[in-house]
Amino acid sequence: MTGTPFSVTTRTTEAGAVVTVEGELDVATAPRLRAGIDTLVLRSGQRLVVDLAGVTFCDSSGISTLIAARNVAEAAGAGIALAAVPGRLRRTFGLIGLADFFPTYPSAEDAFGD
Amino acid sequence: MCEDHPGPGGQESAAPEFSALLEDSAEDLYEHAPCGYLSTLLDGTIAKINTTLLGWLGYEREDVVGRRRFAELLTVGGRIYHETHFAPLLRMQGELGGVAFELKAADGSRLPVLVTSTVKTGTDGQAQLIRTTIFDARDRRAYEQELLRAREEAERERDRVQRLARTLQQTLLPPALAEVPGVQVAAYYHPASADEVGGDFYDLFPLTGDTWGFFLGDVSGKGAAAAVVTSLARYTLRAAAVHDPDPATVLDRLNTVLHHEYRGSDPRYCTVVQGHLRPGGDGAAVTLATGGHPPALLIRADGTSAFVPVPGGQLVGALPRARFATADVLLHPGDTLLLYTDGLTEARTQGRDRYSEEQLQEYLADLAPTTAPAVITAVTGLLAGFGDGVEDDTALLALGIPLPGGDRP
Amino acid sequence: MCAVSMRTRNNVTVTGREEGPTLLLAHGFGCDQNLWRLVVPELARRYRVVLFDHTGAGRSDLSAWTPERYGSLDGYADDVLAICHELDLRDVVLVGHSVSAMIAVLAANREPDRFAKLVLLTPSPCYVDDGDYRGGFSRADIDELLAALESNYLGWSATMAPVIMGNPDRPELGEELTNSFCRTDPAIARVFARVTFLSDNRADLAKVTVPTLILECANDAIAPPEVGRFTHEQIPGSTLVTLNATGHCPQLSAPEATAEAITAFASGQ
């Protein structure tokens, strides 16, 4: 029934970390994203970027996890951004007004640009 | 493999012991095997039986050979099973292994065993006799019974959880919606799972003499944690609605309360439509505020339809300050307003495709002019058609103005 | 609810002489239509032979099984009649083995005009002893059977796997068969066992108006001779034939005698 299998990969750089998510982000898979974020060590001034290019679906559990990620970043004094948000998700995020909480960029590189 | 070890004669080499083994006759091996051996005619009459099995059963050879059938050694239930499953299957397949039975010993006690049989055929291909091996299965039976018991307990636990979820669910929904003069109201709640309490909620309640409040919302996640938030949300919304005429202020109040409770590592939020309804003239005035929730769908009597635009509302409880916007809608006779949660618009229709707001709009606009109960019935039917495709709970609340003159479509 | 094809749902197979009289063979408890394999070739020479799997058995659609419908033999009788309707079978000779003998009685009592004759193979209208009536088993015996089914569910999973088998008895048949025999949902098997062995259809026997043959075995642990005699006495005008065979499945242990007895009755008169 699902297309792309779910996966979370993390990559750390001087500027922060990029978490790349693929597949369906829902109540079953959100804990794995959460686990991925919990492994990161963020420092003040860094940025956590979540790359959503490969995400095919995101429900309230997925959104809660993104909010939790935001809280984690904030607690470390770091920032958070979303990158490459696919069309359908852009709509959902727009509906719930996520833009105010999460700066959004076309790609992870752009997210570290400023 | 050949290790020297002292035997009764002092230092002995391995060879004599080996030949003692070899001299062990086939007869002895058969009679005293660690398992039971049995040969029967095709009708089950016992033709040959080894000493081991006789010992287990407590019979003498002459009591059994030529006089009893194999099936007579079984318990009654086992005999029925033998006649209806074992014997026919053995006949068809020529062999059958690992079937659990209980043998009845001469003293009336029962011996759990595993039975394997093969049909021996002659050179002409005709079946001649049945050879059966019988293994003592006492330990294995004890293990199976333990497994069975564990399974029954798990099933009981599961039933208990489901009953609990059902009870909890029922307390979270309003038992009966308030009656509003001149307005038809209908609602429906569709749980996605029997085990877990969902996070959808709705209510309709009187505020002042001529105004009613309502809301419909969706808490993130499921289960007990979400249920607690649902409870808190409903309570807060109802209390705030009584004090504040402005729905956006009510949502702000809810946001403050939820954010205060749930910031940190396990954030909970909800999306909500909050509003009030004032009947007047031949219809009703509705004011809505939305917090990150799918827009309400208005189906007008003339067949036009639109989503009520309330742009800029944000989800409730996620941030210390959130923005909410309000919209006003006038309902005229034949108009119906539908509030729903995304369990409906995100249901899978076929395979991987999901439903959508556009499809919902198309489907319902065709019903115009319609009524609140008719819309709920139509959408309920839609959900039933999706079957397992509905992955999230769905709540529906419809408000409509009936057409005058008893003309109810 | 849309109409379901009985043909698919109950794995109906039709073989034999297209223009011959129709024999509808209903298997009993514990197996599926494969049980008839050894008599079908002989019967097919003369008759149009219709076989099927009861709902919940063999290759039937297990999802069609509900405890409400199949909590009594009436649900199975409904299916038999539905198959007759769908295939437009008329003047049917209905052959019911074991519990299907009573299913056949129920079906024939509902639509006597559809059936030319009934053959009840090792029937029993009631398995549990009741006062003067001897069915052969006590209630405790049946409970023991249900317990045996429970334990075999856990122990049988390997044996339940399909076995590709040749036919050692009839090499001329030649084909290999995937044996779905005895493979069914254990929960369904348990309910079917309960329904079979706790049913009491003694009162239905006297209502039979279709000419009936009772075929019993000389040595049947499931259906003692008293039961065959009782069934014969209760069904007006019935014929009783005792096969010199052992066990409960003469169509397997004595296929020639069984086929001969069925043919003699079906074609006679």
Image (cartoon, rainbow, N blue to C red):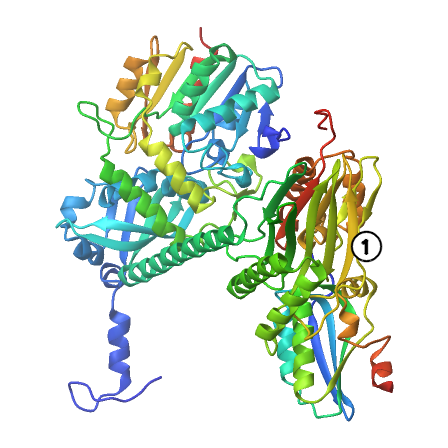
Q: Which residue is mark 1?
A: B309
Q: Residue furthest top?
A: C269
Q: Give me the residue at 82% from left, 80% from top.
A: A108
Closer-to-camera residue (C203/B195): B195
In this view, A49 is above or below C155: below
Give residue B4's quadrant in the image.
bottom left
Whether residue C260 is visible here, answered yes or no, is no
The chain that hosts pointer 1 is B
Give residue B300's quadrant in the image.
top right
Percent of width and height locating residue C66: 48, 37
Within 10 Å of disc 1 (Cα), the crowding (few <14, some 14-19, many 20+) is some
Percent of width and height locating residue B132: 32, 51
Q: Is residue C145 left or right of residue C17?
A: left
Closer-to-camera residue (A113/B187): B187
Callout 1 amino acid: Pro
Q: Give me the residue at 60% from left, 78% from top.
A: B265
In this view, B189 is above or below C13: below
